Image (tube, rainbow, N blue to C red):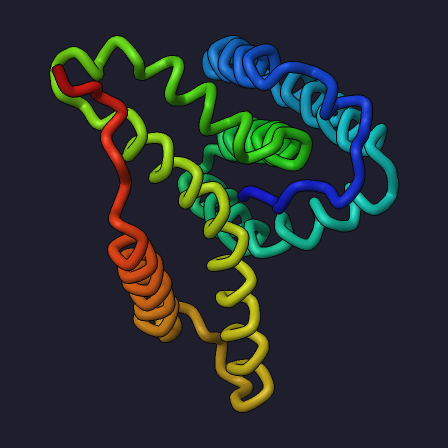
């Protein structure tokens, strides 16, 4: 669940992308084996306060993109309740929300160009075996940029469904959402081809 960049510069923008991504990785590894809801709840509260330190606009922007997750989180928790695993379900939900909010924090406070430059640097050794590092960087940038766009379109489809029917949408919107994603992918592909594609970072000679 990735929000677009904040429209203003905050203190977190001055933190290098390397440090923020390293923090995200370390916290993911640390929280993965934790099953205590109290510890996971504390981690979630800390990430919420971290986001809150960016201001009210950041909190509103975060909540706008987190809300679509609540349905999935509710189903996940219900599944564990049905199978008598309430504690495990709560732990999984808290861990998921913590990591989503932290990833959202990183994307909101890191310029896309900075993120892509870091990816190119990390994948540079693979260029020696023929990997188009620039293509990997562009693909990651597009994924980050269009995830919130697709989520916004999904939200509009759900709103349109609710306006026309009292039945829950459930699986009925899977195909329209998938078609919207394919349409975006086709348009981006056409735009890249019109501009000569993604150049290789390998040097000839």
Query: Is residue 94 in sight in this rendering?
Result: no
Quarter holding residue 175? bottom left
| Name of the residue lying farthest toward the bottom | 164
Comparing 161 with 149, the one in front is: 149
| Position above or below: 122 against 166 | above
In the visual, does 62 lie left or right of 69? right
| Position above or below: 17 against 72 | above
Q: Which residue is drawn at the image coordinates 46% and 23% (left, top)?
A: 117
Quarter holding residue 54? top right
Q: Position of residue 149 (x, y in %)?
A: 52, 58
| Position above or below: 1 against 175 | above
Query: Is residue 103 in sight in this rendering?
Result: yes
Quarter holding residue 166? bottom right
Q: Position of residue 23 (x, y in %)?
A: 58, 12
Comparing 74 with 185, the one in front is: 185
| Position above or below: 174 against 97 | below
In the visual, does 86 lie left or right of 175? right
In the visual, does 56 lie left or right of 63? right
Of the 4 image quadrants, the one containing the N terminus is top right
| Name of the residue lying farthest toward the front | 205
Q: Which residue is drawn at the image coordinates 62% and 51% (left, top)?
A: 65
Of the 4 image quadrants, the one containing the C terminus is top left
Comparing 172 with 11, the one in front is: 11
Q: Position of residue 28 (x, y in %)?
A: 50, 17
In the visual, does 68 lie left or right of 46? left
Q: Give the number of callouts.
A: 0
Q: Which residue is drawn at the image coordinates 76% and 31% (left, top)?
A: 51
């Amino acid at each position: 669940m990735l929000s677009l960049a904040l429209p203003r510069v905050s203190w977190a923008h001055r933190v290098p992308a390397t440090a923020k991504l390293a923090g995200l990785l370390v916290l993911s590894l640390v929280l993965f084996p934790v099953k205590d809801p109290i510890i996971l709840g504390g981690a979630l509260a800390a990430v919420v306060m971290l986001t809150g330190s960016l201001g009210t606009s950041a909190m509103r922007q975060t909540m706008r993109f987190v809300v679509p997750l609540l349905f999935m989180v509710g189903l996940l928790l219900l599944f564990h309740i049905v199978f008598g695993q309430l504690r495990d379900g709560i732990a999984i939900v808290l861990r998921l929300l913590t990591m989503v909010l932290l990833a959202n924090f990183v994307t909101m406070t890191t310029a896309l160009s900075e993120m892509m430059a870091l990816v190119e640097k990390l994948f540079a050794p693979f260029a020696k075996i023929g990997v188009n590092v620039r293509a990997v960087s562009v693909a990651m940038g597009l994924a980050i940029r269009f995830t919130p766009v697709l989520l916004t379109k999904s939200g509009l489809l759900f709103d349109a469904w609710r306006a026309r029917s009292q039945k829950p949408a459930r699986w009925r919107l899977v195909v329209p959402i998938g078609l919207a994603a394919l349409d975006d992918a086709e348009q981006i592909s056409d735009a890249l081809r019109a501009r000569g594609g993604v150049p290789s970072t390998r040097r000839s000679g």
